[in-house]
Amino acid sequence: MVTIFAIAAASWALLMALAPLLQTRRMLQRQSSADVSVAYLLILLPGFALWVAYGVASGNVALVIPNVVAFIVALSTVMCALRLRQRNAPRDSQ
């Protein structure tokens, strides 16, 4: 039973790690990141890194893999949001 829960939890963790890609897709479709909280994602990044470190220290691959994926996806989402904000920022015409 524990193995079944471990597989289910690890699988769901990967889905959760990939979930920000939905936000990235929406930003790219709209060419705007105005409705995205970059601060929220920046708060999550150290948490993912800590879980990766904990997983490595404890030798738990089920913690390492989804949190590495989550870190990469969240970082990509932040970079996309910031790039869109920079592109859509009003330019001073002096």
Image (cartoon, rainbow, N blue to C red):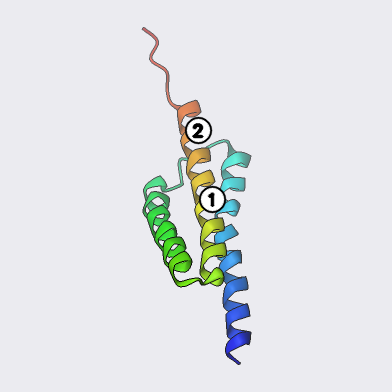
**Residue 45 placement, left or right of 83:** left
Amino acid at the residue labelled 2:
Arg
Disc 1 + disc 2, Cβ < 8 Å: no
- Residue 84's spot in the image, x, y percent? 51, 33
* Viewer-proximal residue among 10 and 12: 10
Q: Residue at x 38, y 15 (%)?
A: 92
Q: In this view of the protein, which residue sits in the foreground, 48 or 85?
A: 48
Going by the picture, which residue comes out furthest to the bottom?
Answer: 1
Residue 18 location, x and y as percent?
A: 59, 58
- The answer to whether one can see residue 72 in this image is yes
Residue that mark 2 sits on: 83
Disc 2 on helix, strand or loop?
Answer: helix
Residue 37 versus residue 52 in the image, above or below: above
User: From the viewer's perspective, is the residue at label 1 or at label 2 nearer?
Assistant: 1
Looking at the picture, how far across and down is residue 23, in whole percent? Answer: 56, 50
Q: Nearer the viewer, residue 55 or 81?
A: 55
Which residue bears the numbered disc 1? 72
How many circles with numbers are drawn on the protein?
Answer: 2
Q: Earlier in the sequence, mark 1 or mark 2?
A: 1
Q: Position of residue 40 (x, y in %)?
A: 39, 53
Mark 2 crowdedness (10 Å alpha carbons): few <14, some 14-19, many ≥20: some
* Residue in the picture at 42% in, 67% down: 54
Task: Name the quadrant of the N terminus.
Answer: bottom right
Mark 1–mark 2 distance (CA, rounded to whole Å):
16 Å
Can residue 19 be seen here? The reply is no
The structure residue drawn at horizontal position 61% and vertical position 65%, both measured from the top left corner, is 15
Badge 1: residue crowd in 10 Å (few <14, some 14–19, many ≥20)? some
Secondary structure at badge 1 equals helix
- Looking at numbered disc 1 in the image, what kind of residue is underneath it? Ile
Mark carried by residue 7: none
Above or below: residue 22 compared with residue 56: above
Q: Residue at x 38, y 55 (%)?
A: 46
